Image: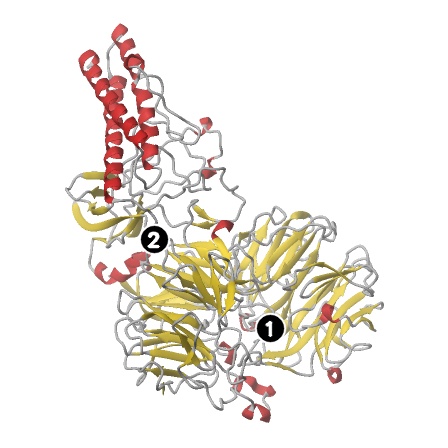
Amino acid sequence: MRTSLFCLSFLFTSLCFSQIDPSNYQDLEYRMIGPFRGGRTVGAVGLPSQPNVFFIGVNNGGVWKTDDYGRTWNPIFDDVPTGSVGDLAVSPSDPNVIYVGTGEGLHRPDLAVGDGMFKSTNGGKSWEHIGLEDVQQVSRVIVHPTNPDVVYVAGLGHPYGANEMRGIFKSVDGGKTWKKTLYINQNTGAIQVEMDPNNPNILFAAMWEHQEGPWENAKFSGPNSGLYKSTDGGDTWRQLTNGLPGAEEGLGRVGVALSASNSKRLYATVDAREKGGVYTSSDAGESWSLVTTENRLWGRGSDFAEIKVHPKDENIVFVGNIASYKSVDGGKTWTSIKGAPGGDDYHRIWINPLHPEIMLFAADQGAVITVNGGDTWSSWYNQPTSQLYHVSTDNQFPYWVYGGQQESGAIGIASRSNGGQISFREFMGVGADEYAYVAPDPLDNNIVYGGRVIRFNKKTGQSQFVGPEVLRSGEFRYLRTMPLLFHPADDSMLLFGTNVIWKTHDGGQHWEQISGNLTRARPEVPASVGDYKTDAMENMPQRAIVYAIGPSPLDKDIIWAGTDDGLIQVTRDGGNTWTNVTPTSITSWDKISQIDAGHFDAGTAYVAVNAIRKDDMQPHIYKTHDFGKTWEEVVTGMNPSGPVNVVREDPKQKGLLFAGTEREVYFSADDGATWQSLRMNMPASSIRDLVVHENDMVVGTHGRSIWILDNFSPLRELVGLSGQNAYLFSPSDAYRVRFNMFSDTPLPPEEPTGQNPPDGALIDYYLGADAQKVELNILDSEGGLVNHFSSNDRAEVLDTTKMQHPTYWIRPFKGLSGESGHHRFVWNLRYKEPQGANRAFAIAAVQYNTPSGPEGPFVAPGTYTIQLKVDGETLEKNITVKLDPRSEMSEEALALQTDLSLQTYSDYGRLQEIREAIDASSAKGRKKEKMLAFRGKGAPEDGDLIYGSIYASELEDETLVGLQSKLLFLLNVLQKTDARPTVATQEAAKQLHTRVGEMVVLWESKFK
């Protein structure tokens, strides 16, 4: 195994330690499966001069761009080390200059922080970090209208603690240096900054004193919120108070909007305990008057404060809140123009100043665009920015993935589609809430449990509440996310956590409480609460719950429990007794985010601790091998600013661990002693959960939907690479699945889709150095050659001028590589494709992933030998090929199908040899004419079972090409499905086989 001393440079520090060379697993790749149901989006901007172009910034989802009015969105921020975006701005004078402020500029229970400011000078092709790294949350970014180097940033600061880097910042050199021009104190941040559209020297800023607390729903406010104005380009500021509520009235967050048609006209949403409402000013903010107290416009001020004015009419105003609203009379009366009963939750409104009928709204559900003033809108079902809390998988094939999606509810989505790609058809709601754990029943794939507790039946679509209490007693605490999972050592035991742990063996008909209160009796108030600490907090009612349950896969009586106030407890007798085994370094309100019980040792557990709510951004993972008597913290190699949400042990390889942080996935091959990034092609995002399903790793992100790392099993064998010139990894079992079984018009390329797994068996190998030639042979159980591949193989040459369709459907060629490092090759589980036929593409097409046909027949299920040859050295491993588990096919039917398929394939090959002999013949004159007539014109065509057909003909009318086309049609009939060939199919195979024999006799007797 190639290891090196690696020095990793993060934004703030560097670490040096021994790491496995990433080239040892370089070809591993994630695929995104969806759902394409947008998540919370807080940054939104368009280009006035290019009305089709818009940009959005997503919480843990990065930056996205559309140039077709929102029909499609493409990510442009994926190489940056953070995915949390608070706002972004495009320079009006140079649209190639884009500024992005990272760290979601909201205070929410599921918020994420960022790394400060980033800048692109080439339209988002590349990015540079430009400072303000400790601001953690950026709420607003604006750029001077004529000078792209002048930029203003509203820095909200640490969401869970006090810090100095907060307030209004200004740069006049494109972000090289920053000056803090408005600062109040370490608790008060800037939530907004806006510029007068007619005078860039006039700015308004909203300051907000607010802090999130360490326990669920804890929020602290102070007296220093307010609205400020600058008339000298932000160098100096003064507070605007005339007519506005102040600290005495409980002033909170303010949202301000300026009228482009009249700079003296301003509007503001004002959140206050008293006198809250929508205000207006007719003298550029010097005095204010209350227009309306309608709560739906300004309520929930800690979440919403978005207000915008029509650029050409000062009396038309828009507000974003749970729904979006419009006034045409200066704010006196309002109409809801977009929103759903469940609440869309709008955070940002952008109106094109040149074409006001074009607007971009950003909400908890994603971003939508209107080009007709709000009559119709684009979709947010084309943005894979879903925010998952937890993920789980079921036992069916293909397996489904489940999880609660923030803002939208619990979902289930297939890991593979019958149509070659995962679309809207492959996901469904499963009855539970947005924060839910989802637990598919291991004994019945049609039953899914979720939330607090809902039992969902896939067959009927009905949901039943089956929780422990219908009429709550008040003894038990229920919060937004509570663990719900089946015990891996007892498929009938469903576990549920409140402040106690419950179990049921009959689907929730009866529940048994198997623990007392497992949370702290009097948790200490963390220092991060700071100035907001009160005496009452020392004796406040208990608020914590069991946040993590880790049942042992080795023993149904062993269950670990972790609370969100920082306790770890374990039972070894099924819940009769519990032992507090919390390490001393874990203190009050360190959230025990996830516990994974050991798969090899009963006393082993791995614990992920997320302390972000105590203003601690460091990673924390603990392990024990003695039931918690001793603990070791194991985080070497991780980014020092990346709280950990989940840690899992590989069920098949002892010491192989996986972890998900607020940035990326990590793995450890040495039981946590050292960690290294497994981000690969996945964009940076908050990894809230990950699970191992057989040889796949399923990752739930909180902003970029669900990703799967197919067959990560090479990571289990990295130790075997040490000193090897070449190494063939043990291949996982392969299933004979047809990649695309649809036979109708394909989805347009613009439709959002996730990726299916690769089309065949995954064969992984490692080269210690560049090789001159690499060969791969597939051998059957008798040593016969099934297929052969070489690093000398090249992509098939296609005459695109004869195609009636664009080339973007075609699957790109990927052959064997001879370069050093890890490589993955996909064998499609078929014999070599029939030679000499015209290559074509079926109607069942997938963009960039449609193989050409005709294809060779599938190999029969069984054991095959993978033979890798590297410059004369031969390596071999066995692979097991299995039938699609959904197939209902007897051994006799399978044997018949296989025999007829190989007979037909062989018959085609015999005729192809004759064709090639004729084509190479030097015969002339009459003999040549007869040979060409016997051959037939052109090349065989792949058979179309839907619209095509073949006909019997007399021997004298038969040609080689015509008979080959019939054989290809028959091969498609035989290979289309896992089913016993019909009598008519068998008869056709018999007749064509006889005809091939007759044609061979003719060739040998008359022409050879």
* Residue at the outermost front position: 509
- At horizontal 68% and vertical 66% (from top left) the residue drawn is 321
Q: Is residue 293 left or right of residue 497?
A: right
Task: Inspect the image, locate mark 1, and give the three-letter code of the amino acid beneath it.
Answer: His
Name the residue tied to disc 2: 27
**Residue 578 is at least partly visible in this image:** yes
Name the front one of labels 1 and 2.
Answer: 1
Horizontal arrangement in the rendering, residue 887 relative to residue 260 (left or right) = left
* Residue 195 rendering spot, x and y as whole percentages: 73, 64
Label 1 or label 2, whichever comes before in sequence order: 2
Q: Position of residue 78 (x, y in %)?
A: 49, 57
Picture layout, residue 608 above or below residue 388 = below
Of residues 978 and 365, which is closer to you in this image? 978
Question: Is there any visible trace of residue 237 in the rendered image?
Answer: no
Relative to 897, residue 81 above or below: below
Residue position for label 1: 107
Q: Secondary structure at mark 1?
A: loop
Q: Disc 1 and disc 2: Cα gap in Å?
A: 39 Å
